[in-house]
Amino acid sequence: MEITQRPLVALLTDFGTRDPWVAAMKIVLTSRCDAEVVDLGHEIAPHDVFEAALFLDFAIEPYRDGRKTIVVAVVDPGVGSDRRIIAAAKGSLVLLAPDNGLLDPAIDDSWELRAVEASHLFERGPSSTFHGRDRFAPVAAALASGAPFGSLGPALERAALVRLPYEPPRVGVREVHGTIIAIDRFGNAVTDVEVSLVGELRDWVARVGSAEIGVSARTYAEREGSREPFLIVGSRGTVEISLARGSAADLLHLDRLGPVHFHRVGADG
């Protein structure tokens, strides 16, 4: 006998877990549908749409095929204003997010997009500042219960959505110009330069600020005991600047959205 999996609703917010806001969203969801509700994370820095966008892009990869999944991403400094709520669908995956750039890295032109205007699904809350509970959660519950995606509102083109103020890597013959997109909790400077753009790290020198990094490693243990920063392929599949048992960001005074330049030094360049 075929076993039908319950739909999955996954939550990503900047609400934290000390306050009751995540619980309020879950109460709405569980009272309106039979979906399994899971947390992607709630510790995005307050109002940090860029951090949320990168988190979302990385976190949804396992959900792109298979089980029906609705990801609700609420990092929403413009809540209560005239900013739109966007629904994006591809295969079994639906993303719900404010139109503030949060969806930008995760979607391309192959996704179906809708402006969520089905106001009959919304809750009438006591204020206009908690759309996570009053709009996002009810819409997610409706989708999990079988509401047609097309019923949410009018279709949109991706060009109509708000984009992040970010430029992807630029690739030359012997150089790649990228951006530090995150400083993780260990002090690794995570770049947007995918390893497929550079190949073997030993063939490259990275320049950030006044520093040049020409040492690479496959694991942190290879650089144990060294106080010299090095290049490594991180969990995102992009190049990171790291320091064994230390913070490369602190050592080199690196910040998110700072530039990083890679120059090929290998003989085959």
Image (cartoon, helix red, strand yellow):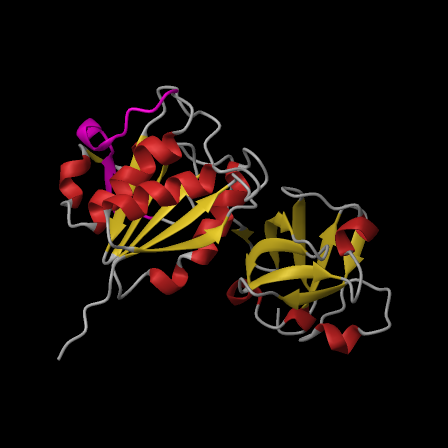
Q: Nearer the viewer, residue 169 or 1?
A: 1
Q: Where is residue 214 in the image (x, y as percent from the top left)?
A: 76, 65
Q: Position of residue 102 (x, y in %)?
A: 43, 40
Total count of labels: 0
Q: Position of residue 31 (x, y in %)?
A: 27, 44
Q: Where is residue 118 in the image (x, y as percent from the top left)?
A: 19, 31
Residue 179, magenta (yes or no): no
Q: Quadrant of the C terminus?
A: bottom right
The residue at the point 38 percent across, 21 percent down is: 128
Can residue 111 be seen here?
Answer: no
Q: Nearer the viewer, residue 100 or 157?
A: 100
Please state the extent of the stretch shown in magenta in the rendering: 108-127
Residue 116, magenta (yes or no): yes
The residue at the point 31 percent across, 32 percent down is: 135
Image quarter of residue 32: top left
Q: In this view, does 98 lie above or below 43?
A: above
Can residue 203 be seen here?
Answer: yes
Most common secondary structure along the magenta stretch: loop
Q: Which of 189 and 170 is in front in this view?
A: 189
Q: In this view, does 82 lie to the left or right of 157?
A: right
The residue at the point 41 percent across, 43 percent down is: 73
Q: Is residue 125 above or below residue 198?
A: above
Q: Is residue 152 left or right of residue 47?
A: left
Q: Which of 109 and 1 is in front in this view?
A: 1
Q: Which residue lies furthest to the bottom in this view?
A: 1
Q: Quadrant of the N terminus?
A: bottom left
Image quarter of residue 190: bottom right
